Amino acid sequence: MSKNEFPSVFNKLKINALVVDEMELNRDLAKKMLEDFGCTVTEADSGEQAYELYFQNAFDVVFMDLQMPGKTGDQVVSDIKKQLANHALFIALSANLMESETDRFIELGFDDFVSKPVTYDKLKDCLSKWYDFDGLNNSNSDFLEGDGFLIDYHKLSQNVSLMGGEKVFIKFIDKFLQENRIIWELLEAAFHAEDREALLSNIHKLSGISTSMCADGYYELLNAVYQTLKQKGEISEEEMKMLHTSSYQLEDDFEKLKLSWQRKGF
């Protein structure tokens, strides 16, 4: 495929997009960004649902998470291409592939790749390869300030500005905090059951949504425990407590941020 095979669209994209990711927060963030570019967005939370939706709708572009339970992203793309000669633009989403690994995701059946966490700049750079559009003018905003290392306040301030301001972004914070608590219940259960695979899976999920919310320090702690678990096959109770303590601290940091916004009336 080449850029010339897709229609030129100026100012805003007028295309139908499908976003496939098992994590609701990741889908919501990607959807908001794509809608700001002018896309009409449909969501799917599994490979199986994505496959069904694809044949019920006329999608121009599909953003597909590679790692999902059940049918993986590359399996969905392969199945679709077996059925159709003409198909949408397929873009892989993954935290485990690098942009330099072009051959790898092309071999998997994709046309392009966006590394997680998905950001405005990454989406714009990717879509600009295939469509002609103006994108968005990044609005200027004061950078947020906060204590601690769990949140990258510089990056978060840019996301808040681009995604409609503080009142809008509070909804994403609330959803993240809810997901964080749910996953931690699963992590605690998996740890006590000595279920290594469940621990790896849920730490991976939590890492993904953490980077999407600019909680880079939290992600680094999660990743350190993830790597220990992969290499040693287990983690200590002390490591779990350290990680859980950082989770409580992150929740407190986000709650303080929300309160500061609410006090100034957005």
Image (spheres, helix red, strand yellow):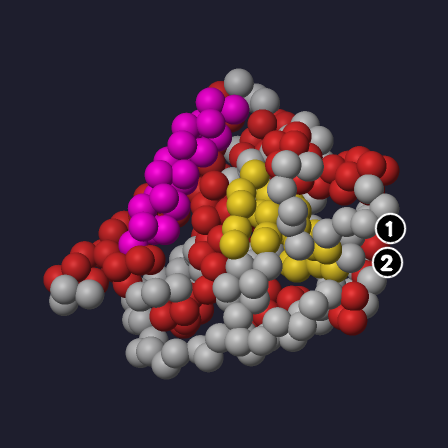
In magenta stretch: residue 29: no
Dot 2 crowding, Cα within 10 Å, few <14, some 14–19, many 20+ = few
**Residue position marked by numbered label 1 in the rendering:** 107
241 left or right of 111? left
Secondary element under disc 2, as helix, strand or loop, is helix
Q: Position of residue 48 (x, y in %)?
A: 66, 30
Residue at point 65% right, 49% down? 59
- Name the chief secondary structure element in magenta: helix
In the rendered image, residue 84, in percent from the top left (x then y), is placed at 82, 42
Name the amino acid type tagged 1.
Answer: Glu
| Near-viewer residue (94 or 56) | 56
Q: Quick check: 61 left or right of 182?
A: right
Q: Is residue 117 left or right of residue 169?
A: right
Residue 173 part of the magenta segment: yes
Note whether residue 156 is visible: no
Q: x%, y% of residue 166?
A: 28, 63
**Quadrant of the rendering where the C terminus is positioned:** bottom left
Residue type at tag 2: Asp
Cβ–Cβ under 8 Å for marks 2 and 1: yes
Element type at mark 1: helix
Residue of label 2: 103
10 Å crowding of disc 1: few (<14), some (14-19), many (20+): few
* Chain part drawn in magenta: 170-190
Residue pictured at 24% horizontal, 56% vertical: 258
Q: CA distance from mark 2 to mark 1?
A: 6 Å
Q: Quadrant of residue 121?
A: bottom right
* Residue in the image at 53% along x and 45% along y: 42
Q: Residue 62: horizontal and vertical position, in percent?
A: 66, 50
